[in-house]
Amino acid sequence: MTGTILNIVTVLVGGALGLLFGARLPERVRSTVVAGLGLFTAAIGFQMFTESGNPIVVLGGLLLGGVLGEWLQIELALQNFGGWLERRFAGGTGEGGTSNRFIRGFLTASLLFCVGPMTILGSIQDGLTGDYSLLAIKSVLDGFAALAFASSLGAGVLFSVIVILVYQGGLSLLAAQAQALISVPMMAEMTAVGGVLLIGLAVSSLLEIKPIRVGNFLPALVIAPLIVAILAALGVQGP
């Protein structure tokens, strides 16, 4: 839960600064900071990938997970869900401008902070190993995003920490319960797959080099450890 608590603190601090000074921060400064975070995220992803004891398992997990994710259209489903929530709660027509603005800020921030591969990766890693480094990176990103959103959408952004606590903290607690079922080799390959997804996230969302539907690769986080378990059951040793 350490990473989730850190995430909550950065969103509160970033949101508060956004309410006070957000309009004064030049866009070029924000874009440069995000680019730096993108480079750092890619480097962390590469470091995680090097923990793999069998890169073929990572490749197999990514290919099978990607096909399954495309078939299930995970990323599209997340986008549609976000659009439905926005239309349902933030698309009113009346004169309640202040109320609508508050709800829109809360909803937009909640979706951004809780829907994405880094949220799932970081929460699982925090719950399984206590390593909250990914959530720390996410916390910095969310802090800057909260600053930007709060400057235009108001105090509703700060209340997104409730969703972060329930969703992200819940994922970490569930991962901690599953710790006994995951062996060291399974965790290594899951970490390596997560590293590849982080590189994809950096390339796609942070550095904006090439669009990648990273969300559709999320099943690989489950498939790669399953491949390890199947190989172990068959007595197949890695390279």
Image: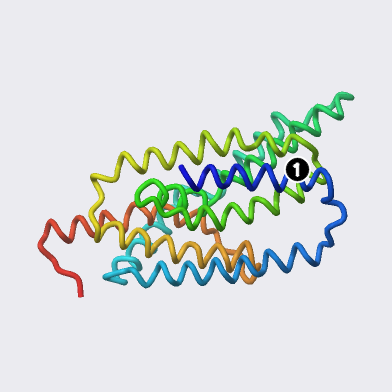
Residue projecting furthest to the bottom: 239
Please report the residue visible at 57 percent of the width from the left and 39 percent of the height from the top. Answer: 164
In this view of the protein, which residue sits in the foreground, 116 or 124?
124
Residue at mark 1: 16
- Say which quadrant the C terminus sits in: bottom left
Q: Quadrant of residue 232?
A: bottom left
Side of 43 where 101 appears, left or right: right
Percent coordinates x, y for residue 116 in the rendering: 55, 50
Q: Please, what is the three-letter code of the amino acid marked with disc 1?
A: Ala
In the figure, 96 relative to 105: above or below?
Answer: above
In the figure, 21 relative to 33: above or below?
Answer: above
Asked if residue 142 lies left or right of residue 239, the reply is: right
Residue depicted at 52% across the width and 54% down the height:
118
Give the percent coordinates (x, y) of residue 112. Answer: 63, 46
Task: Please tell me whether mark 1 sits on a helix, a strand or a loop.
Answer: helix
Quarter holding residue 155: top right
- The local crowd at label 1, few if under 14, some if 14 to 19, many if 20 or more residues have their Cα within 10 Å, is many
Q: Residue at x 57, y 48 (%)?
A: 76
Give the percent coordinates (x, y) of residue 97.
87, 29
Measuring 81% from the left and 43% from the top, which residue is drawn there? 19
Looking at the picture, the colour scheme in use is rainbow
Q: Nearer the viewer, residue 99 or 141?
A: 141
Q: For the view shown, which residue lies furthest in the left direction?
A: 235
Q: Position of residue 88 (x, y in %)?
A: 69, 29
| Circle count | 1
